[in-house]
Amino acid sequence: RSFHVTGVQTCALPIFSDADSDNLRDLRVLVDHVKDSDVLILFQSKEVLRRPWCLIELDTAITHGVPIVALSCVGKKYDFVSAVDFLLHLETCLETLNPSALEVLKKNKVDPIRLAHKLHSVIPNIISIPLNTSASDNAIKATMADLVKAVKCAEPLPIDESFESWLANRKATEQLVLAQALDSDTIRGTQ
């Protein structure tokens, strides 16, 4: 199976990664590589979901039915709980943490709110394979065996909830959280 890697700065595997984008004249070619791949491997790190081209690659994979396999990189500070909230509010989180990412998404005709729906529906449901590059050789070999097995068996995850329903549920969740915060007197600040 052919696969594509996103979210990694350097890659020692003999595959195409977005680290190779330095050698491309047109980053849009990355989208074609994802479409032509059997699997997309997502290296989960603290900032991977802030990188616009990684988001575009994930969007392409989901849109074109390319399964995603996730490697949770030990020491790279990927927080599964915060990632769920980040993806739920992707457009506002990016506005704060990486405003230029929104520009890249829009320039490439990726609607940040629809992208939030896709990613929030898929990424948290992927069971990650932990990768500890400081582990023993045997542990790393076992992780690679798990990765190979996951790649061979990977299937695209469906988006079970329509965009409209997801958007309504997101708004309802936000209103509930706000109401709970107001009821518990946890909001402080100037009046």
Image (cartoon, rainbow, N blue to C red):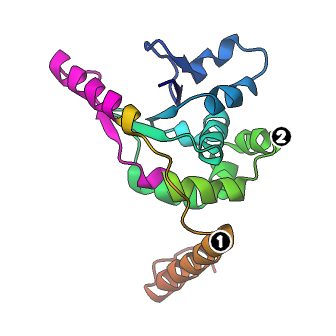
35 or 191, nearer to the observer: 35
Say whether residue 74 is visible.
no
Query: Residue 103's spot in the image, x, y percent?
Result: 79, 42
- According to the picture, the residue beneath numbered tag 1 turns out to be 167
33 relative to 59, above or below = above
The 10 Å Cα crowd at callout 1, few under 14, some 14 to 19, many 20 or more, is some
Report the span colored magenta: 123-149
Three-letter amino acid code at the position of disc 2? Lys
Q: Residue at x 47, y 16 (%)?
A: 11
- According to the picture, the residue beneath numbered tag 2 turns out to be 107
- Kindly state the secondary structure of the residue where label 2 is placed: helix
The 10 Å Cα crowd at callout 2, few under 14, some 14 to 19, many 20 or more, is few
Query: Residue 140's spot in the image, x, y percent?
Result: 24, 22
- Kindly state the secondary structure of the residue where label 1 is placed: helix
Q: Residue at x 47, y 84 (%)?
A: 180
Q: Is residue 148 magenta?
A: yes
Left or right of 18 in this view: 184: left
Q: Is residue 67 magenta?
A: no
Q: Residue at x 60, y 55 (%)?
A: 118
Query: Residue 156's spot in the image, x, y percent?
Result: 50, 47
75 relative to 67, above or below = above
